[in-house]
Amino acid sequence: MDLHPTPEHDEIVESAAAYLASELPAARAPKLTEPSLTGGEWAGLAAMGWFSMGLPEADGGLGLGVVESALVAREFGRQLVPPQAVATMLAVQLAWRLGDRELTEALAAGAQRAALAAPVREAGPAGPSAHGYRLVDTHRADVAIGWSHGGAFLAPMDAFASRVVAPSLDAALEVCVADGLDRAQARWSAEPASSFLPQAQVLTAAVLVGGAEACRDLSAEYAKTRHQFSRPIGSFQAIAHPCADMAVACEAALSCLLYAAVCVRDGAPERDLYSASARSVAYHAAYGNAAASMQVHGGYGQTYEYLPHFYLKRAMIYGLVGGGVEADEAAVLQAASLT
Amino acid sequence: MHLDLTPQERLFREELRDWLAAHVPRETPPKDRFGIRAFDMAWQRIQYDGGWAGIAWPKEYGGRGLSLVEQVIWYEEAARADAPDARCAFVGLYHGGPTLIVNATEEQKAFHLPKILKGETVWCQGFSEPGAGSDLAGLSTRAEIDGDELVVTGSKIWTSYAQVADYQELLLRTDPQSRRHGGLSWVICDMRAPGVSVRPVPMSNGWDSHLNQVFYDEVRLPLANVVGEVGGGWKVAMSTLSFERGTAFTARQMQIAKWVDDLIERARTRTGPDGRPAFGDDEIGRRLARLRAETAALRAMTFAAVARNERRQQPGPDGSMLKIHLARLSKEANQIARRLMGVDALLMTDEMEEHLYGFAATVGGGTDEIQHNIVAERVLGLPKSY
Ligand SMILES: Cc1cc2nc3c(=O)[nH]c(=O)nc-3n(C[C@H](O)[C@H](O)[C@H](O)COP(=O)(O)OP(=O)(O)OC[C@H]3O[C@@H](n4cnc5c(N)ncnc54)[C@H](O)[C@@H]3O)c2cc1C
């Protein structure tokens, strides 16, 4: 048993962190005039090999697995990289499982982008519902990916009879209200046969962990530098303790994430318990840390210009897709009673 | 101790109910700042003309001169009738006006109070600064005294509705040698005076009318605009804050029960992703029940505080307990509301804008942490924690 990242893992994290900090830093979010990512920014992500990294080398990938993908996704979360990035990583996995070589390659190369689909109603055993979708980060997206505990689907954006851009919770991302999914065009992969769900739980958990960590760091930094009553606000326990709690939440969420990622990679018997737990714990850490970070930042924390609200909104987004975090919590109960 | 209304209070409630049913505006309030001002002032004027403005304000300034109990009845009935929020009338009605009633000169009161009640003037609050929020006494906006004028330089921030305000409660330093609480003055600032400029600060939900930064570039104000003593501003500011924390949110305290009732109704009727009503979810049902119980307690707390306030000139530090409790309950209601929205929480609907604004409940009017300090130190007598 060794949950410590290997030097290869550190290298992946460092190169992702360095690239994103210079090319797509979180600080750009409040200043965006066009939602999501430009063509150039997207091409940059693709060139890093992050969309294809989870594919076997024979299929043009790096032969890396879910652990490495999760480490990269965590950096996406930290820098508020738009959801298309992790959605495309997941879409590659799903297209590959569906045996769609052409789509797998297009997504892996960054030639196609995926948006996240959140259905109003859970999918049934036969596939996704035709009605009621909210699609997130649709700007320049080609396909939509949605999943819940019954299975996952990939559909071209055009498979929705109607798609209307709506005011978005997160103004840095485009959201559409969509309806009339032509199910003939949607590719469906049923669980548990496809084993896609644990991947999706782990990668969304990873993005959430990155967000939780970013909020912890923003808060700690602000608590050290913001002065009131002639001392740093971090010297008040009312601020210091919530910051410490943010660290605890991150430690729990990151550990659970790594444990879950290893379970998914190795097909360990505890997999379902840990992948579902990882998303629940990561969601609450991300949401809780973002809300606490808004509070630590006082008036500034309520403004559009300061970053905590972006992390809060991203936590809401990643908590709503994939059938909602409540579905993962139900799965935790079920998995716990089986182990 | 009794719950009975006097015959007069009962009559008041009945008349009020009929009047509200006939007069509450039914159109959706606008969102742009000038629209907000026009709407809120029009509603205030309707209340004034109907004889329902300033229930507990003295008669000589246009109020009704009734008790705080009647004032609370008013809030409760207004909530029940879905009457609009005070919004940009908030500062004038709930702490600016009350501060003047307790601290201002006859001339100041006679000039400003009727205008506030008639919906002719919007007030804003210029207390917080970029460097002085919780630590209000650390403020640095200053005024030099030049004959019978003050010359103001500096900046305030988070000034709600500053763009559409006519007057401001401006707290500044008049004694350059002073530090902390000494040497401050509470001044009525004319927001149209030359040298005043306002920059909107957009909020997390996109609103850009609510928060502003105000800049003062050698703004000349008559010395006669000082409320209370020159150099005695801290005492007046504490009076303002006692109203802001003690009674300004009474309307909100009365609204929250209605809000929770609406959530319960929605949980009964709206279905979740599994197609079942959300109320069937044990967690939501239990949380709603607990929240409804706590709002009942908040209403009782409000009446207890009103009974105390009837016996003193202004609310005491115990007002902070109401503020803490109200903020806690609104945040919980807000969380449940978001659960009930389901995937529609991905859209910036009106409801979602309100939801995000709800995070400010533990910051605006003094943070939750500061309210806790006040309760610990001034209600319980614990040692000062900083
Ligand atoms: C929606 C909204 C509307 C507002 N409207 C107005 C207005 O109209 N006019 C106006 O003047 N102001 C207004 N404010 C400002 C508000 O009063 C301040 O934001 C508040 O007092 C906190 O100050 P700050 O933002 O500078 O935060 P800071 O004081 O910097 O606080 C940062 C964090 O440190 C904590 N902290 C600071 N000191 C202590 C301590 N001693 N012990 C424990 N914790 C501490 C705070 O609780 C907070 O969590 C508004 C604020 C909001 C959010």
Image (cartoon, rainbow, N blue to C red):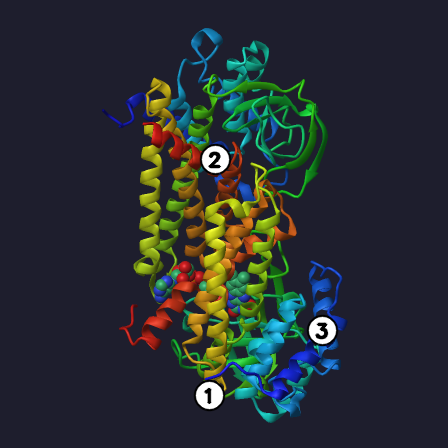
* Residue closer to the observer: B135 or A85: A85
Q: Distance between the residues labelled 1 and 3?
A: 30 Å
Which three-letter amino acid code belongs to the residue tagged 3?
Answer: Leu
Q: Nearer the viewer, mark 1 or mark 3?
A: 3
* Sooner in the amino-acid sequence: mark 1 or mark 3: 3
The residue singled out by tag 1 in the image is B312
Q: Is residue B131 visible?
A: no
Quadrant in the rendering for residue B265: bottom right
**Residue A287, horizontal then vertical, whole percent:** 45, 45
Residue type, mark 2 in image: Ala
Task: Name the element at disc 1.
Answer: loop
| The CB of the residue at mark 3 lies under 8 Å from ligand 1 | no
Specify the amino acid type for callout 1.
Arg
Q: In which quarter of the image is the N terminus of chain B?
A: bottom left
Residue behind mark 3:
B20
Q: Mark 2 points at which residue?
A: A327
Residue that lies at the very extreme toward the top in this rendered image: A58
Q: Vertically, is B54 above or below A290? A: below
As drawn, the label of residue A259 is: none
Question: Which chain letter matches label 2?
Answer: A
The one nearer the camera, B148 or B114, is B114
- Residue at horizontal 65 percent and vertical 52 percent from the top: B350
Q: Nearest the camera: B49 or A306? A: B49
Q: How far apart are marks 1 and 2 (CA)?
A: 54 Å
Q: Is residue B315 visible?
A: yes
**What's the residue at 44%, 18% (across, down)?**
A54
Q: Which residue is drawn at 41% across and 13% down?
A: A63
Q: Is mark 3 on a helix, strand or loop?
A: helix
Badge 1 and badge 3 both on one subunit = yes
Residues under numbered marks 1 and 3 in contact, where contact means CB atoms less than 8 Å apart: no
Residue sitting nearer the eye, A125 or B195: A125
